[in-house]
Image (tube, rainbow, N blue to C red):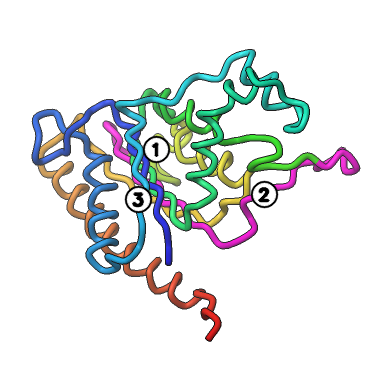
Amino acid sequence: MPHILHLDASARPGLAGKDQHGSHSRNLSHRFVSQWLARRGQDSLTYRDIGQNPPSIINHDWIASSFTPEEQREPWMREALAESEQLVDELIAADVLVIGTPLYNFGMPAALKAWIDQIVRPGRTVDIDDSNPLDPYVPKLADRPRHAVILTARGGVGFDVGGAMAHMNHLEPNLITALGFIGITRVHQIAIEGQEVGGELLAESVAQGLNKVDALVAQLQRALQANRTPEPA
């Protein structure tokens, strides 16, 4: 039974179209999850609003603890990693990772970067093979098919691949690199643009984005059903 991990990274707590100054990225991610569960109510969900409750920024104690072998960690080290352990456990349990995030100043919000820093962990999500100095990193989350769905909202236009502003978009490329590093390589992207422009341009982009979300839900559910391992009789 597939499990979904849903993250929202927008600083705006509401939903666009329903709440004043609501978030377009939250609107996309909530559409995805609601459509998914409407079709497959038996699937499970973990939700984290990291936009309103950001993960801790890593510090010296976290780094020292993370790079100390588990069996050698002192109690304070385990405490320093407690939040990270929970976030990593949530990610490992997920078959579908849904990230709703705006583009802030050409990159990801600080809260989402803090989450990335907490879940890229030696020994938990990536191993280091010292015998291969040219390519020592071994992703641990490639053990089974996992999908990442990146649902983005942008103020400007032209940030898609091939667009006039694509070279200034460091959000999706950064996320894809970090997730691929730990083994999540099945990535799907949907974005809406034009919040700063508004009007028909934004309305059309939102409508197209919601339609793409609905189509992606159906596509992924078919793919997961096709790849489902039969349960023993």
Q: Which of marks 2 and 3 is in front?
A: 2
Q: Earlier in the sequence, mark 1 or mark 2?
A: 2
Specify whether residue 223 is in view: yes
Specify whether residue 102 is in view: no
Dot 1 amino acid type: Ala
Residue 1: x and y, percent? 42, 67
Residue 43: x and y, percent? 35, 63
Q: Relative to 43, is 179 on the left or the right?
A: right
Task: Give the structural element (helix, strand or loop) at label 2.
Answer: loop
Report which residue position mark 1 lands on: 164
Task: Give the structural element (helix, strand or loop) at label 1.
Answer: loop
Q: Relative to 232, is 219 on the left or the right?
A: left
Q: Which residue lies furthest to the top in this view?
A: 60
Report which residue position mark 2 lands on: 140
Q: Which residue range is magenta in the image?
A: 129-157
Q: Which of 107 and 121 is in front in this view?
A: 121
Report which residue position mark 3 lands on: 190
Q: Which of marks 2 and 3 is nearer the N terminus?
A: 2
Q: In which quarter of the image is residue 20?
A: top left
Q: Which of marks 1 and 3 is in front?
A: 3
Which residue is pictured at 56% across the width and 51% down the height?
184
